[in-house]
Amino acid sequence: MILDQLVWPLALVLAALVLGPYLLAVLDGLVARGLGLTRGPGLWLAPLRRGAWWLIQHTNVTEAPDGRAWRLAPALYLALAAGGLALVPWSRAWVATDIATSLVLWGSIEALATVVIFLQGWSANTHLTLVGAYRYVALGLSYILVSMFVLIGVALPAESLALTQVIISQQELWNVLRQPLGLPLFLIVGLAITFRGPFNLADSTDLAGGTSADVSGAQRLVWEFARSAMLVAFSGIATAAFLGGWLGPWLPGPLWVAFKMLAVLALLAWLGPAFARLTPEHCVSLMWVVLLPLAFVDLIWAGVEALS
Amino acid sequence: MELLLFFVILILSLGAGLLLQWWPSRHHPMPTYPQRAPFLGGGLPDTHAWSRFHVRYYPMALLLIAFEMEMMFMYPWAVVYVAQGMKAVMEMGMFLAILSVGILYGWREGVFRWQ
């Protein structure tokens, strides 16, 4: 009882929190090689080397930062990612946080992520970080609606806001096929919440690094780690909401969840560098004028499908 | 029980995040002031970071609040949707249609494209 409810779920969440970002870094390295962006040895060691360098590097500070908030922002971002991972059901029995409103809790994590990313840009007290932070808020206010409409779509056939019920409702057909618009729209949200690829408005190179322009050392390590961990948590939620979670033949449930999460991560790692970055105004227009109506269509589709 | 584990995970990760930032640099001296100048991609810091920024997406943020209010109704709506059937479709359809007019109006007024 204790083993099933506490120990195994906690172990799985912590394992995903530690291993996930590393595997994502390896996948990023693979994609970068495939696109011919980098060469050289050390596919498996390069992320560790980069992490160790950040860990022992002297941390620089700015002249008058909001010191406490600056330290708190990366740690909070990591905590939000861990909270998201806690919601992922690994099997029928192994769920760290199996509450009736886990989709709502994930929505609040997405909203709080915007606050934390703004805090990171704000507290350095320099220009470029603040510009990155304001840009991110524009993006954060735009993607959250797309995300929630798509997630309400998966809640309709389940008649519940619990992720376990959402998975059980996919026993006949996974949501990725039943609501074909859902997963592509949700993947865009995943790129936006971790500001990767086309939606990297916060940390973009035209801002010389944006919110992390003045962040170095261990602080930078925690920030980048949390950013990857958030994508891992997102892939867990996407797996549960659209890819049937633990459902699958032969293998035990947690393995299926891990495979599906890795597949989502690989897809996202490829989508990131495959598309050009959007300007903030285009990004916001795209979110509200194209993607949000598409999310409405997805919701109507899900609704009609659930009633038929 | 579930929420206990949630808070345990939150506190563990928050603590790890703070410790990982504090522990390696606890003996490092503070950098000198010239080194602390903000990195501006090569530019010189000739203005203060506290100079006034005009964030030009207030109308968009207001539009978001309208939809967030709608979201609050949508959570319970999603749970009873199948039980209520066509009635639920019509209700939420009307609500969304009214809010969509807001998007169209905002689009025409250039809310999503600021200069």
Image: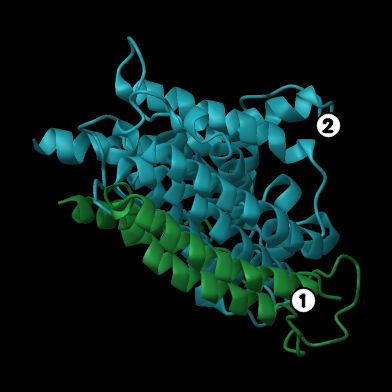
Task: Residue at 33%, 49% (x, y): give it.
Answer: B85
Task: Residue at 75%, 48% (x, y): give it.
Answer: A198
In the rendered image, residue A30, in percent from the top left (x then y), is placed at 69, 25
Q: Chain of mark 2?
A: A
User: Does residue B22 show up?
Assistant: no
Number of on-image labels: 2
Residue A301 vs A285, above or below: the answer is above
Q: Which chain is green?
A: B
User: Does residue A37 show up?
Assistant: yes
Task: Residue at 82%, 45% (x, y): give it.
Answer: A276
Residue A263 vs residue A290, the one in the foreground: A290
Q: Which residue is mark 1?
A: A127
The reply to the same-chain question for discs 1 and 2 is yes
Density class for disc 1 (Cα within 10 Å; few <14, some 14-19, many ≥20) is many
Task: Residue at 46%, 23% (x, y): give it.
Answer: A259
Colour in which the image shows chain A: cyan
The first of marks 1 and 2 along the sequence is: 2
Residue A152 vs residue A283, the one in the foreground: A152
Residue A2 vs residue A293, the one in the foreground: A293
Question: How does the figure colour the protein chain or chains?
Answer: by chain
Residue A110 lies left or right of residue A248; in this view the side is right
Please tell me the numbered disc located at residue B13: none
Residue A12 lies left or right of residue B38; in this view the side is left
Q: Which residue is mark 2?
A: A37
